[in-house]
Image (cartoon, rainbow, N blue to C red):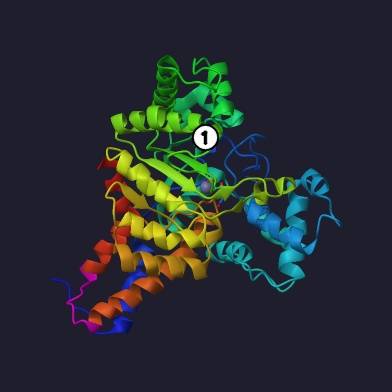
Amino acid sequence: MSKVFSSRPAIEKSVAKLLRDQPIIDMHTHLYPPSFGTPVPNCGGGGKTDRGGLLLWGLDELLTYHYLVAEVFRVVPATELAYEAFWKMPKTAQADHVWKHLFVERTPLSEACRGVLTCLELLGLDVDRKKDLARLRKWFTRQDPDKYIDRVMELSHVESITMTNNVFDDNERGRWLKDAASLRSDSRFKTVLRIDPILGNWQTAAGKLSAWGYAVGDGRALSAANIEEGQRFLHDWLDRQQAIYTALSIGPSWRYPAEADHAQAGQIALEKMILPVLAQRKLPFAMMIGSVRGVNAALGDAGDSLGKADVSSVARLCVAFPQNKFFITMLARENQHELCVTARKFGNLMIFGCWWFLNNPSLIEEITRMRLELLGTSMIPQHSDSRVLDQLLYKWEHSRTMIGKVLVDKYADLLEAEWPLTEGDIKADVERLFKGNFEEFLVR
Ligand code: HDL
Ligand code: ZN
């Protein structure tokens, strides 16, 4: 029988150890195994590279992460360096530019800057006083992506990486059509069918599905036959990818039921195609709500922003489709409390992550505290959203620290209440938060 805690310092020590040792299922990333190709040369640059490769890793990819692109254009504005000129620069020159302006000439205080430093530190690479990027770069060119993935997963304690497999991305779709089996060959990487346009822009989606051989109509009307074809498309791709759930990101104006005329077709696609297929296959539907695409399109992926969304639409969806399971995360800080309360009402709703602009220590702490107080351990506190493999190191290191800080406070409250808390209790809680809740929701 494990001993009952009697002091806060003992709890702190135990939480830190149990969090560090806990294998993690990262339920939303933009990472890929080497079978998807990598544009970064392996083994000193001699290895095969694949310009359209989807596995991003290494120092230059870390430094040109779109979060840092947005930040570097704040200090060297487009009036001094045109966006197009930056995008035309080779990746190493872009990385040099970011390093110079955000790390050498300014203190790297932002979370995205600090993240690069945490990665280097966890990899055992020290930045000398000269802040010499070339020396650091040399170490990365000696890494082989296959072995490097093993190392990063071991150091970050991530045991399963959930991908984002966007069927509407021509590069990725072409790879799936060519050799799906090889793409699924690394069991540490799980697939997710990503279908944003189906809800966000059915007209565009319908045009593409029709071109791919699915007679879903012209995007205006949706006959029973069109709906059947849309379901066939989803079944085909869920089978091809062996996806563990289906996901989409949608803007803050999304409403259920749809209010705007242009959203009616998307709602029919949701009600008659997506949700029936997922219910039949017992697969969850992940909705990531609140992203506003292309606020400054010249910044590319760095140009997106957020908006306050409508949580009551999520509630109405959970009521209308009790046989479906919903993973929901929202991008606006202002939506978090109402989303927590809504999660208290529906067992088919699992809220997850501190997404994107919320993935900062101050907000992870605030949101995790709110969730534990309203939901206990029946939620998934974090996903990394990593786009560059090495980011698993910092995103999980920083999240573990903040989630651990909140857990210690909550356990200390139980101590106050003279609850006989044991290390076994904490171990079970940590396992649920970082792995068990996700696994259970998949099979519930
Ligand atoms: O839509 C999404 O999945 C978002 O996470 C975007 O990919 C976003 O650009 C991002 O990388 N956020 O961290
Ligand atoms: Zn994402």
Number of disc labels: 1
Q: Residues within 10 Å of mark 1 (few under 14, many from 20)?
A: many
Q: Would you name the residue on which mark 1 appears?
A: 263
Question: What are the residue bounds of the magenta stretch?
Answer: 416-424
Give residue 296's position: percent from left, percent from top.
71, 49
Residue at the far left in the pictured view? 1
Q: Does the magenta stretch include residue 228?
A: no
Give residue 93's position: percent from left, percent from top.
78, 52
Give residue 361's position: percent from left, percent from top.
51, 68
Say above or below: 211 vs 87.
Answer: above
Q: Quadrant of residue 144?
A: top right
Say above or below: 230 vs 193.
Answer: above
Q: Quadrant of residue 50?
A: top right
Which sits in the foreground, 200 or 245? 200
| One can see residue 242 in this view | no
Q: Main secondary structure of the magenta part?
A: loop
Task: Please name the amino acid that badge 1 sits on.
Answer: Ala
Residue in view at x 46 percent, y 66 percent: 364
Rendered-image quadrant of the C terminus: top left
Residue in view at x 46 percent, y 58 percent: 335
| One can see residue 362 in this view | yes
Give residue 303's position: percent from left, percent from top.
68, 50
Which sits in the foreground, 405 or 298? 298
Rendered-image quadrant of the N terminus: bottom left
